[in-house]
Image (cartoon, helix red, strand yellow):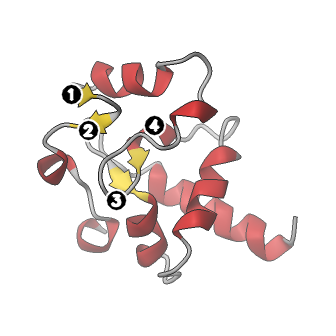
Amino acid sequence: MKEQTLSFFESVYEVVRLVPYGRVTTYGAIANYLGAVRSARMVGYAMNNSHDKQVPAHRVVNRKGLLTGKHHFEGTNLMQQLLENEGIRVENNQIQNFENLFWDPSKAL
């Protein structure tokens, strides 16, 4: 990977580590905060590579609150279980009460 991509990934990880317990954010919100508005997919790639980075990747979902990254977690429902352990209700791979649980790094940081 290019050094620039690695530093972008590290920036993503820094933001994800700041997502509060019991809250979620989106790939797009992270990209926007980092000044890379159209790079939500790159944030997703960073999340795919975060398994050994001490990053709460389960707190990052798509813009509609769907658990689109769940297939990158071990087991069939690990992402959902991790969210539910934080008090977040998930039904049919969808965060319930998403609007109230959404954490926007551009507003919070």
User: Whole-Å distance between the Cαs marked 1 and 3?
Assistant: 17 Å
Helix, strand or loop status at disc 1: loop
Q: Is residue 22 visible?
A: yes
Q: Are marks 1 and 2 in contact (CB under 8 Å)?
A: yes
Q: Nearer the viewer, residue 82 or 94?
A: 94
Q: Do the residues labelled 4 and 1 touch (CB within 8 Å)?
A: no
User: Whole-Å distance between the Cαs marked 4 and 2?
Assistant: 11 Å
Marker disc for residue 63: 3
Q: Which of the two labelled residues, at mark 1 and mark 2, occupies the earlier sequence position?
A: 1
Q: What residue type is labelled 3?
A: Arg
Q: Which of the two labelled residues, at mark 4 and mark 2, occupies the earlier sequence position?
A: 4
* Label 4 Cα crowd, 10 Å radius (few <14 / some 14-19 / many 20+): many
Q: Where is residue 45 in the image (x, y as percent from the top left)?
A: 66, 56
User: Whole-Å distance between the Cαs marked 3 and 2?
Assistant: 11 Å
Q: Is residue 53 left or right of residue 61?
A: right
Helix, strand or loop status at disc 3: loop
Marker disc for residue 58: 4
Q: What residue type is labelled 2?
A: Ile
Q: In which quarter of the image is the C terminus?
A: bottom left
Q: Which of the two labelled residues, at mark 3 and mark 2, occupies the earlier sequence position?
A: 3
Q: Do the residues labelled 1 and 3 touch (CB within 8 Å)?
A: no
Q: Are marks 4 and 2 in contact (CB under 8 Å)?
A: no
